[in-house]
Image (spheres, helix red, strand yellow):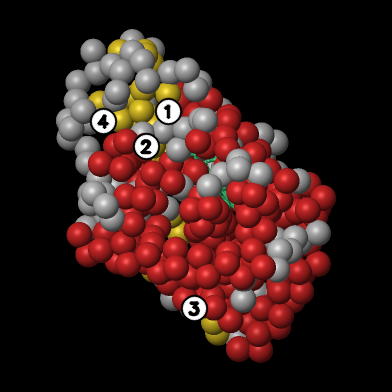
Amino acid sequence: MNTPVRIDPTSREFRRDSIAIYRHLLRTQPVTALDDGRYLLCGYHDVKRALTDLESFRRPTEASVARRRPGSMSEAFARNNMIGLNPPDNTRFRRAMARAFAPRRVEQLAPDMRKSCDALIDRMIESRECDFIHDFALPLPVAIICRMLDIPLADQHLFEHWSAALLAGLELSADPGEAERAETATANLYDYLDGIAAERRRHPGEDLISTLIEAANEEKISAQEVIWGAITLLVAGHETTTHLLGNGMLALIRDPGQMRLLRERPDLTVNAVEEFLRYDPSVYVLFRETSRDVTFGATAVPRGTFLILSLAAANRDPSVFADPDRLDITRENARQHLAFGAGFHLCLGQAVARLEGRIAFEMLMRRITTIELAREPTPRDGLMFKGNHEMPVRVL
Ligand code: HEM
């Protein structure tokens, strides 16, 4: 019997100190019944099972639709963004986008990534004191997602703001103000990308929006789904990568031995990126619901139960990762992390994020001899998305 406990994962206390709480739960109660009927799963194998067993678990589309105001743009987003959908709707989107994420297409992004990194690092070195998030970790992924969607970089100040507001509204802990800002942001993003898509219909290219339009022309997705697909890509494709870069750099700054090792051994960069994703992932939790009665060990969980799956906890499960609270860029099984999810819904953009992470850390370590915190970072205290709003650094 798993007695419900008084843990509120949406509370500020939980969100602020979640790693310590996950560490405790992994030891004492990896399957936690919350007193509102939801369950929180922390163990690696349970989380992976909930992500991969499509017969017993599904994304809670209706629950997330029910949290939105009927008729609102946020409700429409909940119904139409592929990250919230189950097959067969999700499958239509995945098929429509798959071509754009083929290894050859991703590799073609490398020269642009290097060029952007070089320019951003030049500016960081010149200014000596800067904000690692605003001056590097955010503009790099923004430049790449703009390139993938072929939208003007000059508009970045618009969609950066809208995208951040939309993400904040997806949190279970979103307050009415955040929900309202998400509503406005979703409407603005829709109008903006609708305009871009109209232009792209007249002048198709090689970009992701043209790929979605082509799928719509072949009647694989609808005209509206072109826009929802583009919104999903814009939102999913940059802030997550920002936090990979930001959380990874912060982990290195806090562990000078590992920073030194990475400088001396650039061949470790690929594995270091995996270890950053394991140690402090950008997405801390995902949501699922049971589509039939299931058991986790001795705990029976009825059909229709809302599950909070902690990727951050699973990534620190000591039965899979030895000495899990230690950053170890030589860790042999770092790549087993669940930072990109697992199974059918595994992140479509993972190859882009990995390439961007590798190029960024290779160039940062090569070109910047010393980087240290100028002040403590300002954390983003979401339940789902983790990173820092600001990270002032001194660069030498
Ligand atoms: C470090 C960076 C990234 C992280 C940590 C990350 C994480 C994730 C996770 C955890 C999921 C699975 C959600 C679930 O199972 O419910 C996901 C899905 C997805 N990601 Fe990423 N992501 C990253 C970068 C990107 C990029 C760069 C793109 C696109 C350019 C992207 C596009 C997507 C898409 C389209 C899905 C939906 C897959 C589906 O629903 O079947 N992601 N991502």
In the image shown, does 396 or 114 lie closer to the viewer?
114
Outermost residue toward the bottom? Answer: 126
- Left or right position of 155 against 260: left
Q: Residue at x 50, y 22 (%)?
A: 54
Q: Residue at x 58, y 38 (%)?
A: 92
Across and down, in percent, residue 191 comes to 44, 68
Contact check, label 3 and label 1, Cβ < 8 Å: no
In the image shown, does 286 or 20 lie closer to the viewer?
286
| Mark 2: secondary structure | helix
Residue type, label 2: Thr
* Discs 2/3, front: 2
Disc 1 target residue: 58
Q: Establish whether ligand 1 lies closer than 8 Å to the Cβ of label 1.
A: no
- Work out whether 23 lies above or below 252: above
Gap between marks 3 and 4 measured at Cα: 38 Å
Disc with the residue nearer the chain's start (2 vs 3) = 2
Gap between marks 4 and 1 measured at Cα: 15 Å
Gap between marks 2 and 4 measured at Cα: 15 Å
Gap between marks 1 and 2 measured at Cα: 8 Å
Disc with the residue nearer the chain's start (3 vs 4) = 4
Is residue 331 something that shows in the picture?
A: yes
Across and down, in percent, residue 135 comes to 57, 77
Residue type, label 4: Arg
Across and down, in percent, residue 345 comes to 55, 35
Contact check, label 1 and label 2, Cβ < 8 Å: yes
Disc 3 target residue: 157
Is residue 42 something that shows in the picture?
A: no
| Mark 4: secondary structure | loop
